[in-house]
Amino acid sequence: MEVDGKVVLITGAARGMGKQDAIAFAREGARLVLTDVDLTELEKTADELRAAGREVSTYILDVSNRAACFELAEAVSADVGTVDVLVNNAGIVVCDDVLVLSERDVTRMMEVNYYGMVWMMQAFVPAMVARRSGHVVNMCSSAGKIGVPRLGGYCATKFAAIGITDSIRPELKKSGVGFTIVNPGYVNTGMFQGSHVPFITRWQTPEKIAGAIVRAVHKNYAEICVPRFSIRFASVLRNLGIPRVTDFVQGLLGGHKSFTAWQKDASRPF
């Protein structure tokens, strides 16, 4: 799919990965619809893009609210037009041991990272199917390929996100709607501040991930991994079905200590 002149909706677009996605699609000539829970930062991002001559519409949205997602679909249809590309980027993380994660932390991560993705697909994909054209980008993660100590709650949401995308893609294989799973590794956005990268990989820039996402939409890739080797290695390691081997290798590479010094980004309102 070429995105010049097409409407691209990005959730969680106020900062970090979502903001870089917006910049990358804007360079391709897309008309942007940006949503976030943080209206102040969202408008800052939109103003930067408008100053560069881009067409941007903004909406406040908590993706965990199913009714709000459907209301947004109606509003965007009336205000902007049909959405051609949906980028389900909104996500939150809390790093802590599974036994001490609070009920709110576990629930909130699942509501935003997984349920929000489902609600947005239910709200926007039927219109794509009706016109037999569209693309959905679901931001999953290397954390959806292999469990990591102190990242268990987040990993669970990303395993779920990969699972539902792998399910809806064949359900709609003849619909004209494409689906891309995006599995970034350690991305330097501040979301994982204080974390340590295992020996097998390194920090990725959000600009690199955003560029890969645009290419994936152009080429209708079903799944991308950035970086490719380390994430595919983790996936193969887990799928051997020998958890003790997985634990040993991951520990040897430093993966078990990645999130021991994680620091919450105080600038994020969630």
Image: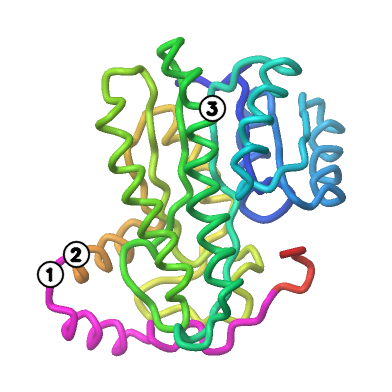
| Disc 2 packing (10 Å; few <14; some 14–19; many ≥20) | some
Looking at the image, is mark 3 or mark 1 earlier in the sequence? 3
Q: Which mark is residue 124?
A: 3
Q: Which mark is residue 240?
A: 1
2 and 1 marks in contact (CB < 8 Å): yes
Question: How far apart are labels 2 and 3 at the CA level?
Answer: 33 Å
Name which residue type carries label 3. Answer: Phe
Which residue in the structure is indicated by mark 2?
Answer: 236
Q: Residue at x 18, y 80 (%)?
A: 243
Q: Residue at x 39, y 23 (%)?
A: 177
Name which residue type carries label 1. Answer: Leu
Q: Position of residue 47 (x, y in %)?
A: 86, 38
Per the rendered image, the range of residues in magenta is 239-264
Q: Position of residue 207 (x, y in %)?
A: 59, 50
Q: Is residue 174 magenta?
A: no
Closer to the eye: label 3 or 1: 3
| Disc 3 packing (10 Å; few <14; some 14–19; many ≥20) | many
Q: Is residue 246 magenta?
A: yes
Q: Position of residue 225 (x, y in %)?
A: 37, 53
Q: Is residue 254 visible?
A: yes
Dot 3: element: helix
Q: Position of residue 107 (x, y in %)?
A: 54, 66
